[in-house]
């Protein structure tokens, strides 16, 4: 494994993934703000949640990039299209599994069955995160495909 290449491109790809998701929200394609959601797991202070969530998003992306790198090393090939393909699978996993688990583990997120309370006022994402907008699944899959394409396109295999 090429550690230097992973450190740089894993971090850079994560920054771009986060920027793509922020752009999708800013353009009105989705109401989902993953750093905010992650941050509110740890604090109810909405301003601090944005910072905490951003840092958690960076660490998560960096760690997840290890799975991509592991696949590239196993295949002895890294390419933008291999990375994009892994990214699509990763995005689908996020939508089908991670998002579905969020209301059960998030202390400030309402559930589909019980609705909001004074302490659980974040809207649950719903199936494929559709409660955050009809374009949310597309924005999640595209941002993860971009993440993978960048990582696969620029990661240099170990020699």
Image: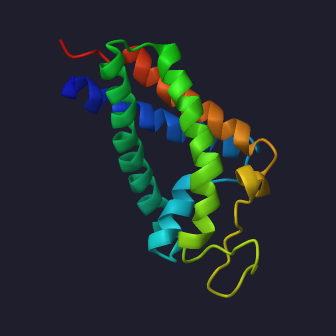
Q: Residue at x 44, y 50 (%)?
A: 57
Q: Work out which residue is located at the far right of the displayed protein and give it.
A: 134
Q: Work out which residue is located at the far left of the displayed protein and give it.
A: 159
Q: Residue at x 64, y 40 (%)?
A: 140
Front in this rendered view, residue 94 or 134: 94
Q: How is the image coloured?
A: rainbow
Q: Work out which residue is located at the far bottom of the displayed protein and give it.
A: 118
Instruction: Say left or right for 80 vs 5.
Output: right
Q: Residue at x 78, y 58 (%)?
A: 131
Look at the picture and state if 50 lies above or below 143.
Answer: below
User: Would residue 11 be visible to someone looking at this image?
Assistant: no
User: Which image quarter: residue 92?
Assistant: top right
Q: How many marks?
A: 0
Front in this rendered view, residue 12 or 130: 130
Q: Work out which residue is located at the far front of the displayed protein and give it.
A: 74
Front in this rendered view, residue 94 or 51: 94
The image quadrant where one finds the N terminus is top left
Look at the picture and state if 40 lies above or below 23.
Answer: below
Q: Residue at x 48, y 15 (%)?
A: 80
The image quadrant where one finds the C terminus is top left
User: Would residue 138 be visible to someone looking at this image?
Assistant: yes
Where is residue 153 drawn, in percent x and y? 43, 15
Look at the picture and state if 130 lies above or below 62.
Answer: below
Where is residue 52 drawn, in percent x and y? 42, 62
Where is residue 88 drawn, in percent x and y? 59, 30
């Amino acid at each position: 494994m090429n550690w230097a290449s992973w450190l740089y491109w894993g971090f850079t790809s994560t920054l771009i993934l986060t920027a793509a998701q922020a752009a999708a929200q800013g353009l009105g394609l989705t109401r989902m703000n993953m750093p905010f959601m992650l941050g509110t797991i740890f604090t109810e202070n909405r301003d601090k949640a944005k910072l905490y969530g951003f840092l958690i998003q960076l660490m998560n992306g960096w760690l997840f990039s290890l799975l991509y790198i592991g696949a590239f090393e196993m295949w002895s090939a890294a390419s933008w299209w291999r990375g994009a393909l892994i990214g699509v699978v990763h995005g689908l996993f996020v939508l089908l599994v991670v998002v579905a688990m969020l209301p059960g583990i998030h202390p400030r997120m309402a559930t589909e069955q019980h609705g909001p309370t004074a302490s659980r006022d974040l809207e649950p994402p719903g199936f494929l995160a559709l409660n955050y907008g009809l374009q949310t699944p597309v924005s999640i899959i595209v941002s993860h495909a971009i993440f993978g394409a960048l990582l696969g396109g620029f990661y240099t295999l170990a020699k």
